Structures are given as structure tokens and as C-alpha cells.
Image (cartoon, rainbow, N blue to C red):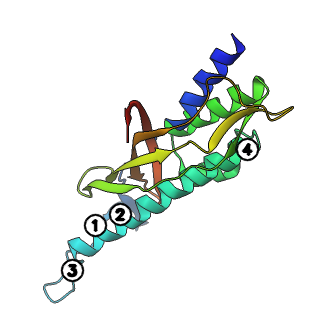
Amino acid sequence: MRGRQLRRAAICLLAVVAAAPLTACASGRESVERPAAPRADEQRTDPEIDRQAAEKAALDAYSGYLAASRTASGRSDPRAPELTRYLADPLLTRVQLSIRDAKEHGAMRTGTVKSDPTVIAVSLDAKPATVEIQDCLDTTGYRLVYAKDKRVVPGSGGGRHFSTATATRYPDGRWLINSGTTHRDQPC
């Protein structure tokens, strides 16, 4: 039973804008401040530069997510602050629960994850803006082990599997990974 729960925890581990007008009081009356329309001579942003910046920020968040979850799993710390730097709900809660479940069963993660992510879609006009990422995660060197003696938990072996994730731009400007799935039925 314990091994089955740990395997389930291992699988879960590898698996997220409201605009309000500004008001100001002027002579006892409220007024709404709206941004001025751009003048014809003002420089407009280049959509290609915006797309490239979004791709870079999303890939940085994805890389940070993998590193933060590996570090938090190795320390058996589901509340590690680095997780919230790169993750948002619902993925944040899934990762935290997976780390907590492993810890409660006396297990932790060790090793490394190899990743080579690619951006497959950028939606800057969506509310909120999103970037879709795909990856072939290689977890052959990333093991769920018993914390006490570092023995590998039976049935928790890694492999190379197709993975997808979504990075979302939040109102504060940060790109966070808020959903992700490892497709165990799709080796790569």
C-alpha cells in the first residue's frame, strides 16, 4: 500500500486580470483617469519583440519551476518559498501536495531532471496572456527514495516522457507556470 501511494505521489509531482479604473477626487467629485491615446508620432511596440520577450520570460519561469520543485522535493519542503516564485495555482497546490505526501510516507526526491523545452504557442492578446510550452522530460536520474536509507521506492522509476505546461502573465507582470502535465503514455 505504501509503495502504491508513493508511486502516485511521484506521478503527481511531475505533473496555474481584472483591470480597474483609477479614481481620484477632484473638487469633491470623482473622476476616472484614462491613459491618453498614443500620439501619431509616438513609437509603438514591435509585436515580434513582445512575443520574444514573452517566450523568454515563460521559459525562464519553466526552468525555475523545475529547479524549485527539485530543490523543494529534495528537502521535503512543500512550503519552500522558491515554489511561489515560479508557480501559481492550480499547479502550485499540486506540487506542494505531492511533496507533502512523499514526506508523510518517509520519501524524498534525489537526482536531476533533464529538460529541453520549446515554446509552441504565444497568446499575448488573451486575457491573461499565456505561453504554451512542451518538453521531453528525462527523469531517469530523478528518483523517489526513502529518506531514512536512500533506497529507491519500488515502482517509482523515471523515464523520458512528453510534458506540457502553461505560463501565464499575472497582473503584477510576472510569468508563472500554472498548469502542467506529464504524459506518461507518450514517451519521447
Q: CA distance from mark 1 to mark 2?
A: 6 Å
Q: In the picture provided, is 137 more to the left or to the right than 141?
A: left
Between residue 39 and residue 153, name the one nearer to us.
153
- The residue at which mark 4 appears reads as 74
Residues at discs 2 and 3 in contact (Cβ within 8 Å): no
In the depicted structure, whether residue 112 falls above or below residue 28: above
Give the residue type at disc 4. Gly
Q: In the picture provided, is 40 more to the left or to the right than 106?
A: left
Q: In the picture provided, is 107 more to the left or to the right than 33?
A: right
As helix, strand or loop, the secondary structure at mark 4 comes to helix
Q: Position of residue 26 (x, y in %)?
A: 40, 68
Q: Position of residue 138 (x, y in %)?
A: 50, 46
Q: Earlier in the sequence, mark 2 or mark 4?
A: 2
Q: In the rendered image, which quarter is residue 56 located in? A: bottom left
- The residue at which mark 3 appears reads as 44
Between residue 106 and residue 176, name the one nearer to us.
106
Q: Position of residue 86 (x, y in %)?
A: 55, 53
- The residue at which mark 2 appears reads as 55
As helix, strand or loop, the secondary structure at mark 3 comes to loop
Residues at discs 1 and 2 in contact (Cβ within 8 Å): yes
Between residue 46 and residue 148, name the one nearer to us.
148
Give the residue type at disc 1. Arg
Q: Position of residue 171 (x, y in %)?
A: 43, 56
In the depicted structure, whether residue 76 falls above or below residue 146: below
As helix, strand or loop, the secondary structure at mark 1 comes to helix
Instruction: Report whether residue 173 is seen.
Output: no
Q: CA distance from mark 3 to mark 4?
A: 46 Å
